[in-house]
């Protein structure tokens, strides 16, 4: 996927003019957010489970080498193969070799953010292998030739009318010549088109929500059942996952599962939870003959022991973006890489470089909702501040921005000067507001005043009012 994070401001401006996107994003707030609140309220131990999930992930990260090696040992015992890949190039070439070994022409894919991260689809296409997305959202954006805009709802930015036009354009070759507008019938049409592709696929590629160390199993959760068909019908199953997805035991999986679906979609549990342990046995009726796990580092081991380690607790539920006012305004594509929303703003600077992604840590009002709803309590605002400091230290941010911060720092370190400066500023801004108390235009604040008035300060400064109150 081409990285466009450097153009975040342009992307956001364009997104805010898109009426279809505005209509589609309205559903995020009304749907995911409200359902998550209801699900959390219905489970008295929900906050305790969040603590337990956080502690499990922290324990894994502190013993990551041990659990990864134990997971590999168990996979081998079950008849599978683990491939260790340090970067996207290695992961893609490994997957290609597995496909070539079985002379694969088509592969079906379950939803996987890691394969989005490494750009697997375009790579396979360039090598003459056809990838077919089977998650409905992923299938829609594959037809549209777009990246996902949400971790769990990749096509959440699409309206039903846009999906109608996509299906009408691409499904006529399968005999669907009528423009279908009913949502349920659209789903049925996609299911019918995909059904045959499941059967003829040579390889099935899925992601993994969990890698269970004690059994060597991979686990995926879906609401469509496409993951089951993807990994059980082809002769070869490849699970692609990043290293932090390992988890000690099945009991730990059950704990994290109780906060995953509730935080993601407001469900008590996803409809399908599928565990895969090695290839099929001699007495199994069906299942893959070959089972491979491709483990991607992708810069994650460099985060261990740093200020960024807590990001590796992420279980990809999407709750942070569902509750983010910035995401609601600009959508996922504005962030310019695979991971959108607050988690993307915190993670992408590490994955694609702070020079490319320097705008993202500033795409936050610091309201703190992302941290409030994160099921594993990732302190995203703290990490965003870390990246802002890095951008300042490395002089990546523009000079006027750095000069403004240095000027503010000068006054902040001198309380007497800060009080004098705020006192003068309040008086000047008050005069600029005139009788209406509204400022139409203010230098260096065009981003605000271009679309709304800036309320002028009224009365004394906060510190003057506090001092007066203390004197009572």
Image: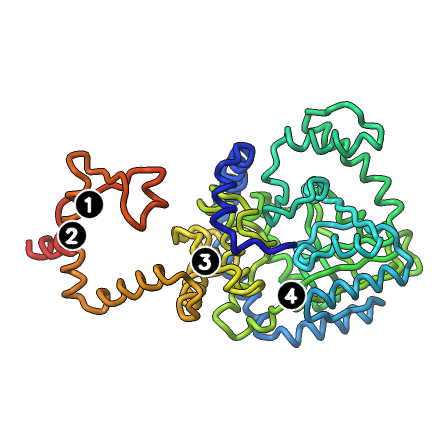
Q: Is residue 252 left or right of residue 127?
A: left
Q: Specify the color scheme.
A: rainbow
Residue neighbourhood size for the residue with mark 2, other residues' Cα within 10 Å, grouped as few (<14), some (14–19), many (≥20): some
> Residue 203, percent across and down?
84, 54
CA–CA distance in space, label 4 to label 2: 52 Å
Q: Earlier in the sequence, mark 4 or mark 3?
A: 4
Q: Earlier in the sequence, mark 4 or mark 2?
A: 4
> Residue 437, percent across and down?
19, 38
- Regarding mark 1 in the picture, which secondary structure is present there? loop
Q: Is residue 282 above or below residue 43?
A: below
Which residue corresponds to the image point at 67% horizontal and 33% vertical from the top-left?
A: 163
User: What residue would you read off at disc 1?
Assistant: 457
Residue neighbourhood size for the residue with mark 1, other residues' Cα within 10 Å, grouped as few (<14), some (14–19), many (≥20): some
User: What residue would you read off at disc 2?
Assistant: 461
- Regarding mark 4 in the picture, which secondary structure is present there? strand
User: What residue would you read off at disc 4?
Assistant: 247
CA–CA distance in space, label 4 to label 1: 53 Å
CA–CA distance in space, label 1 to label 3: 28 Å
User: What residue would you read off at disc 3?
Assistant: 361
Residue 179: image tag:
none
Q: Earlier in the sequence, mark 4 or mark 1?
A: 4
Query: Can residue 92 be seen by looking at this rendering?
Result: yes
- Regarding mark 2 in the picture, which secondary structure is present there? loop
CA–CA distance in space, label 4 to label 3: 29 Å
Work out whether residue 185 or residue 98 is closer to the camera in this orientation and state it. Answer: 98
Residue neighbourhood size for the residue with mark 4, other residues' Cα within 10 Å, grouped as few (<14), some (14–19), many (≥20): many
Q: Quadrant of the N terminus?
A: bottom right
């Amino acid at each position: 996927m081409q990285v466009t994070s450097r153009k975040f401001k342009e992307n956001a401006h364009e997104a805010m003019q898109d009426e279809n996107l505005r209509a589609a994003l309205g559903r995020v707030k009304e749907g995911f957010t409200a359902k998550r609140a209801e699900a959390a309220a219905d489970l008295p131990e929900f906050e305790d489970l969040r603590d337990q999930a956080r502690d499990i992930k922290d324990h894994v990260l502190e013993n990551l080498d041990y659990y990864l090696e134990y997971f590999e040992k168990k996979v081998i015992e079950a008849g599978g193969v683990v491939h260790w890949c340090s970067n996207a190039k290695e992961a893609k070439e490994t997957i290609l070799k597995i496909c070539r070994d079985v002379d694969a022409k088509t592969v079906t894919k379950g939803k996987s953010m890691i394969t989005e991260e490494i750009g697997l689809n375009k790579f396979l296409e360039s090598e003459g292998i056809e990838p077919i997305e089977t998650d409905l959202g992923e299938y829609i954006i594959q037809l549209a030739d777009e990246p996902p805009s949400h971790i769990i709802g990749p096509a959440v930015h699409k309206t039903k009318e846009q999906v109608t036009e996509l299906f009408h354009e691409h499904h006529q070759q399968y005999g669907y010549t009528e423009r279908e507008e009913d949502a349920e019938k659209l789903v049925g049409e996609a299911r019918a088109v995909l059904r045959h592709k499941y059967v003829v696929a040579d390889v099935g590629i899925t992601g993994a929500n969990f890698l269970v160390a004690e059994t060597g199993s991979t686990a995926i959760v879906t609401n469509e059942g496409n993951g089951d068909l993807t990994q059980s019908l082809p002769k070869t199953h490849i699970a692609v996952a990043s290293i932090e997805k390992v988890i000690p035991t099945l009991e730990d999986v059950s704990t994290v599962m109780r906060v995953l679906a509730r935080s993601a979609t407001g469900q008590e549990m996803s409809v399908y939870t599928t565990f895969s342990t090695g290839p099929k046995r001699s007495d199994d009726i069906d299942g893959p003959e070959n089972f491979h796990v491709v483990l991607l580092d992708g810069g994650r081991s460099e985060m261990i022991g740093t200020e960024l380690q807590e990001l590796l607790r992420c279980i990809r539920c999407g709750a942070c973006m569902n509750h983010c006012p910035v995401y609601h305004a600009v959508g996922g594509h504005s962030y310019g890489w695979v991971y959108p929303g607050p988690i993307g703003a915190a993670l992408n600077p590490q994955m694609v470089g702070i020079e490319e992604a320097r705008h993202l840590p500033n795409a936050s009002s610091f309201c703190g909702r992302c941290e409030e709803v994160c099921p594993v309590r990732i302190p995203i605002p703290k990490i965003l501040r870390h990246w802002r400091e890095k951008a300042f230290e490395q002089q990546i941010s523009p000079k006027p921005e750095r000069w403004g911060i240095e000027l503010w720092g000068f006054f902040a370190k001198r309380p007497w000067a800060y009080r004098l400066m705020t006192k003068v500023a309040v008086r000047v801004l008050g005069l600029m507001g005139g009788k209406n108390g509204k400022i139409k235009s203010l230098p260096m604040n065009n981003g605000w005043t271009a679309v709304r008035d800036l309320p002028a300060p009224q009365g004394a400064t906060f510190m003057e009012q506090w001092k007066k109150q203390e004197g009572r």
